[in-house]
Amino acid sequence: MKVTAIALVLMLLGGCCQSAFDSCERAFDSNAWQLADAASEEGRYKLIPALTRDHLIVGRGREALRSLLGKPDESEAAPRWWTARGRYDAYVVRFYYNIIDYDTEYLLLIYDEKDMLHSWAIATIPG
């Protein structure tokens, strides 16, 4: 009974977060995404759960996603083959230290020949 009451209080206070990204679920904010600094703890990384849950829907058009996310990121670290055929958009999600060097995580959007979202992935490029 005590455990149930404590769990209920935590849920009501918003302290119950069950995300792989260690953050509470919140609505996706397009402006916050476009203005975010990937190096910041509050950057794009914490927006990923809501983005993937509510907006990365297979079959959604590239233009609609670019309107939501802004222009894809250009980076020397991103492998050229991601964008070589024009079917991929890459967005920096975050930078993090992996004991030896900094790694970069990208949100990779993969489109079909009609520019409709085919799939997406989070890809890590070692520093």
Image (spheres, grey):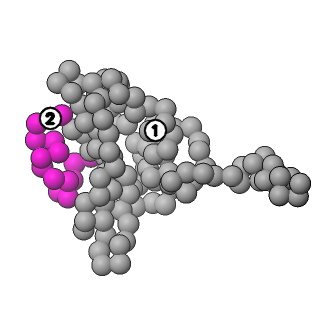
Q: Name the spot of residue 96 as percent of width and height, x first.
A: 38, 66
| Amino acid marked by disc 2 | Gly
Is there any visible trace of residue 79 in the rendered image? yes
Is there any visible trace of residue 31 in the rendered image? no
What number is the disc on residue 86? 2
Other-residue count near label 1 (Cα within 10 Å), few / some / many at <14 / 14–19 / ≥20: many
- The quarter in which the N terminus is drawn is bottom right
User: Can you say whether 42 is above or below 27 in the image?
Assistant: below
Q: Name the spot of residue 94 as percent of width and height, x first.
A: 38, 57
Task: Indicate left or right for 18 with 50 as reference.
Answer: right
What number is the disc on residue 14? none
Q: Which SS class for mark 1?
A: helix
Task: Indicate left or right for 100 with 68 as reference.
Answer: left
Other-residue count near label 2 (Cα within 10 Å), few / some / many at <14 / 14–19 / ≥20: few
Q: Which residue position is annotated with label 1? A: 51
What residue is drawn where x is 78% and y is 53%? 7
Task: Give, as a single range, the part of the protein colored magenta.
Answer: 71-87
